Amino acid sequence: MPLHPRAHSRLAFLLGLLFLVLTPAGAADDALVVTVTAEDEARALEQGVEQALVRLAGLRSGPVLDLAGELLEGRDDEGWIAALERRQQLEEDRYRLEFDPFRLRTALRDAGVPALLGERPALLVWAVHDAGGQRDLLGDAVDGPGILAALDELAEARDMPLLFPLGDLEDRRSAQPSDIVGGVSEPLVAAARRYEADGVLLLHVRETASGAEARVVAVHDTREYRSSASGDSPAVAAREAVARALDRVAEPLARVAAEPEWLRLGFAGIQGFAAFERLRAELARLQAVEAARLDALAGDSVVLQVRTGLDRDDLVDLLRGSGFARAEAPDAAPEADAWLDRR
């Protein structure tokens, strides 16, 4: 006799949860892949370690670069370090390196390196390309000389969400190139609300006789940060200026994780296996969370055991950035160190 659709759905939910409970905590940690251009394997490893640590930490800082140097000092006779799982030469000067992210996160924590442990801020890029007396507002329809493509690559390399405007009529009415060039942020922060961004980057790229110059005003959490860079092309200058701005934005958000411990967090309003998987995946993306596994079910609520280097209050505060807020425990709910729900 076939199962009723509702019974089938419930069975699938429970089987899925059982699978997740039995899966080792680190099994879902995919290798961290970095592709670099270098003259030889030794230089490729140096670049790869730095890029991998910057991606995990969320910023390029002195402590991150110092840790990269320390890891490289531990190379064996064949030029390998413990966190390197695989290296492959793709072309004459291009290499693909795979790192164990768990080992690198542990190295960051043990060295006391500040890192972005929570949800990374999504920043909307308002960009103007200035060349030959003409200023173009960049967006989906207009990229200029590869500027937004370069920033898209930077966002992927840093694992930092950058948003780009449509550049449609509404954007052109509310985002004036003169405001971007002048660093006037208030109207551009207001215009970014349609994209649900956490902040904005005002990028002005100006072509010069020797290449290009780029200036950035970053606005996040009511603070402004400025950076600049030059390069032999607009794309190179823009990427470097934005990279420096991202470091400035990340610096006050970075924290040092302590030795991880298990906390029991309750989440209300989790209905069905799909919602549970989304929650678990969302927690797994946070640098502050090493593992998350099922502890108890109660109606439309779930309790997870979360392994983290933050104490309860700091973790709850960090989860506010992901849209969670403290909540009262549901009736007859299992015990938890804290209860949360979506705001």
Image (cartoon, rainbow, N blue to C red):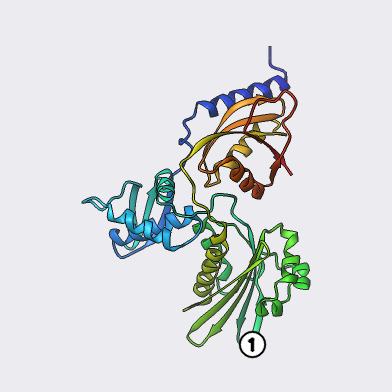
Q: Residues within 10 Å of mark 1 (few under 14, many from 20)?
A: few
Image point (40%, 51%), residue name: 111
Q: Residue at the spot x=64%, y=87% of the render?
A: 133
Q: Secondary structure at mark 1?
A: loop
Observer-nearest residue: 221 or 1? 221
Residue 271: name its quadrant.
Answer: top right
Question: What amino acid does circle 1 point to?
Answer: Gly
Identify the residue at image location x=42%, y=45%: 106
Q: Nearer the viewer, residue 171 or 276?
A: 276
- In-front residue for pair 20/107: 107
Task: Give the vertical position of 302 relative to 59 (above or below).
Answer: above
Residue situated furthest left in the rendering:
77
Residue 131 in percent (x, y) is at 60, 83
Would you place residue 306 above or below residue 18 in this image? below
* Residue 26 shows up from this direction: yes
| Residue 91 visible somewhere in the drawing | no
In depth, the one of 46 and 37 nearer the eye is 46
**Depicted 327 relative to depicted 237: above or below:** above
Q: Position of residue 254 (x, y in %)?
A: 53, 56
Quarter occupied by the N terminus: top right
Q: Is residue 171 above or below residue 3?
A: below
Residue at which label 1 appears: 133
Q: Position of residue 307 (x, y in %)?
A: 52, 37
| Image quarter hosting the C terminus | top right
Number of numbered markers: 1
138 lies left or right of 87: right
| Residue 150 x, y percent position in the rendering | 53, 67
Residue at the extreme top = 1
